[in-house]
């Protein structure tokens, strides 16, 4: 058995090494495929950009030609127009674009004017053609440079063709260059015919006349500056700007796929990478299929072949290197993710700090105005302003100790009462369930509690003639739930009961309840003292924390009720 195992061990080791090598080879193959695809995607984008850029360059020429006609009220002599064509460089290079021309828009029956223009420009009797059932004609009266192909197009009524007419109407409506669908140009007079298209720019357009039922108002435009394009010539000229671009293209207008604008030498299916782009060009939607050329498929995977050979001998070492590399990449991703989380957290902290600072400034300004409004002198203002700022600061200590901008109702009341009572006494005065307030509610309630404590110290249950204070609260189920706080002050004698008034403190309490808490306040005097009931809606998003077993036990020992209606209910 041991001898058999000894013989099998090398084969097992070789099989394991080969399996690892195959896995490594496959991983490299995938990586090379992804890299080749990404590189070819950039190449495809470059090819598309070359085509669209060349089209837009010709559009610039059309705009300049329109400006020439506008500057001369539509009356441009042929020699002036030809000089313009020479200056923009079209006459020396007709690759793709056949030239630039002009076609007036006239009533269908009035062909004498265009034919006279043709005679003046080209010294030839050229009739307007073909017959039409349309109310308007757009015959070509000017087309330069005047080579054999362009001369054959003179006099052709482009408005009679539905493909050209649709682009003309769009050009009038938009006052922008508009491209026609695929069409065979009138210039195709020899055996090598190409599919082409035209770009129109309306001159003197009046879109309001497009829907007119008759011709009484005149044509919807004075005419069109236009450029005819041969599809194959245009694409070849555009790609010639990057002569080493290894691509083959097929371009179709999505509205007329049966008439492709261009089709190059397409490789056999499955032998080359392919990318598809859809572009919007001057009112038309083109689909451009791009194939990679200039190499065999296996050339893209030389690295795969090399790794496959090497992995047979060094599979184990390669596997360890790949594992280490992946581990490093994972660590790098974790570090980047941690850095991103830290940056996001710092941003949140900064925004929170800005938000709180703005809120604090607004509150301090409000407190200052309120304190100044009720003060008789500087000392009174200083004392009231300082006391209220301290109340605000006390609540801020609670807010600063929380992960979120929130505070407990019990903590707020405890902080206020601890300014005049011992901690143990305060615990016996408070009774109610856990209630969590958001930042706005916490600040508002702190100011209200400060005023109530101040009044209780001066006149009420905490004054010299006071018999005691009880503060209780409950949550009433409604939509949304409401917090109800019962503030009960007892007095030793009926004479000690303070008179009801509307002092500054009372106004501040009501303003905070109504403005900040959307709540109400009710006061009632009895023979035993004063009962104040505060109500305001609870923010449902604020979840109460568990008070803990110790707090529950203290509440059980104190009891949930106080005699004579002095609890919060």
Image (cartoon, helix red, strand yellow):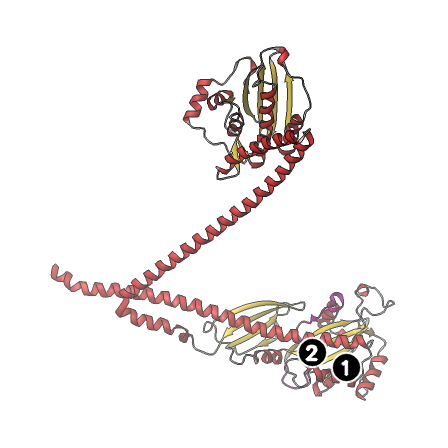
The image's mark for residue 142 is 1
Residue 480 visible, this angle: no
The image's mark for residue 228 is 2
Q: Do labels 2 and 1 touch, CB within 8 Å?
A: no
* Quarter of the image where one finds residue 499: top right
Q: Mark 2 to mark 1: distance in Å?
A: 13 Å
Q: Position of residue 495 (x, y in %)?
A: 64, 11
Q: Could you tell whether 498 is left or right of 420 in the image?
A: right
Q: Position of residue 372 (x, y in %)?
A: 67, 33
Looking at the rendering, the stretch of residues picked out in magenta corresponds to 171-193
Q: Nearer the viewer, residue 428 or 367?
A: 367
Mark closest to the chain's N terminus, 2 or 1: 1
Q: Position of residue 517 (x, y in %)?
A: 62, 32
Q: Determine the residue located farthest toward the right in the rendered image.
A: 216
Looking at the rendering, in which quadrant would you find the N terminus? bottom left
Residue 507 visible, this angle: yes
Give the total of numbered labels. 2
Q: Is residue 90 positioned above or below 166 on the image? A: below
Residue under the image location 81 percent in, 76 percent down: 74
């Amino acid at each position: 058995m041991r001898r058999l195992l000894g013989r099998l061990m090398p084969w097992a080791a070789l099989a394991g090494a080969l399996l690892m090598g195959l896995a490594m080879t496959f991983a490299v193959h995938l990586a090379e495929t992804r890299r080749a695809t990404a590189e070819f995607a950039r190449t495809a984008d470059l090819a598309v950009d070359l085509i669209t850029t060349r089209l837009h360059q010709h559009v610039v020429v059309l705009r300049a030609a329109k400006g020439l006609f506008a500057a001369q009220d539509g009356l441009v002599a042929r020699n002036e127009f030809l000089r313009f064509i020479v200056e923009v460089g079209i006459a020396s290079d007709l690759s793709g674009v056949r030239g630039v021309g002009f076609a007036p828009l006239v009533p269908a029956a009035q062909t004498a004017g265009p034919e006279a223009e043709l005679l003046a420009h080209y010294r030839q009797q050229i009739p307007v053609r073909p017959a039409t059932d349309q109310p308007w004609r757009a015959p070509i009266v000017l087309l330069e440079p005047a080579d054999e192909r362009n001369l054959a197009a003179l006099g052709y009524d482009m408005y009679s063709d539905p493909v050209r007419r649709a682009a003309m109407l769009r050009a009038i409506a938009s006052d922008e260059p508009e491209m026609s669908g695929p069409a065979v140009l009138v210039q195709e007079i020899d055996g090598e015919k190409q599919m082409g298209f035209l770009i129109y720019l309306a001159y003197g357009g009046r879109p309001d006349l497009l829907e007119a039922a008759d011709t009484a108002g005149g044509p919807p435009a004075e005419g069109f500056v236009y450029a005819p394009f041969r599809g194959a010539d245009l694409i070849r000229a555009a790609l010639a700007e990057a002569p080493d671009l290894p691509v083959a293209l097929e371009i179709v207008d999505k509205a007329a796929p049966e008439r492709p604008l261009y089709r190059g030498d397409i490789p056999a299916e499955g032998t080359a990478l392919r990318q598809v782009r859809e572009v919007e060009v001057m009112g038309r939607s083109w689909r451009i299929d791009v194939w990679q050329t200039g190499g065999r498929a296996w050339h893209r995977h030389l690295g795969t072949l090399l790794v496959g050979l090497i992995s047979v001998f060094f599979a184990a070492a390669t596997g360890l290197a790949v594992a280490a590399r992946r581990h490093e990449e994972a660590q790098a991703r974790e570090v980047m993710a941690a850095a991103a989380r830290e940056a996001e957290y710092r941003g949140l902290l900064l925004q929170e700090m800005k938000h709180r600072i703005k809120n604090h400034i607004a509150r301090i300004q409000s407190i200052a105005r309120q304190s100044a409004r009720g003060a008789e002198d500087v000392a009174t203002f200083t004392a009231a302003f300082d006391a209220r700022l301290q109340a605000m600061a006390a609540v801020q200590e609670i807010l600063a100790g929380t992960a979120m901008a929130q505070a407990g109702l019990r903590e707020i009341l405890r902080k206020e009462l601890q300014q005049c009572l011992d901690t143990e006494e305060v615990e016996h005065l408070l009774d109610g369930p856990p209630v969590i307030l958001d930042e706005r509610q916490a600040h508002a309630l702190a100011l209200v509690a400060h005023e109530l404590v101040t009044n209780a110290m001066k006149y009420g249950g905490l004054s010299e003639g006071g018999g005691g204070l009880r503060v209780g609260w409950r949550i009433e189920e409604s939509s949304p739930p409401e917090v109800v706080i019962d503030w009960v002050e007892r007095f030793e004698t009926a004479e000690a009961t303070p008179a009801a008034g509307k002092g500054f403190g009372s106004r501040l309490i009501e303003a905070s309840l109504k403005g900040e808490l959307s709540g109400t306040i009710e006061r009632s005097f009895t023979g035993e003292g004063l009962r104040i009931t505060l109500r305001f809606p609870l923010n449902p998003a604020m979840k109460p924390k568990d008070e803990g077993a110790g707090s529950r036990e203290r509440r059980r020992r104190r009891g949930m009720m106080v005699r004579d209606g002095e609890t919060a209910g």
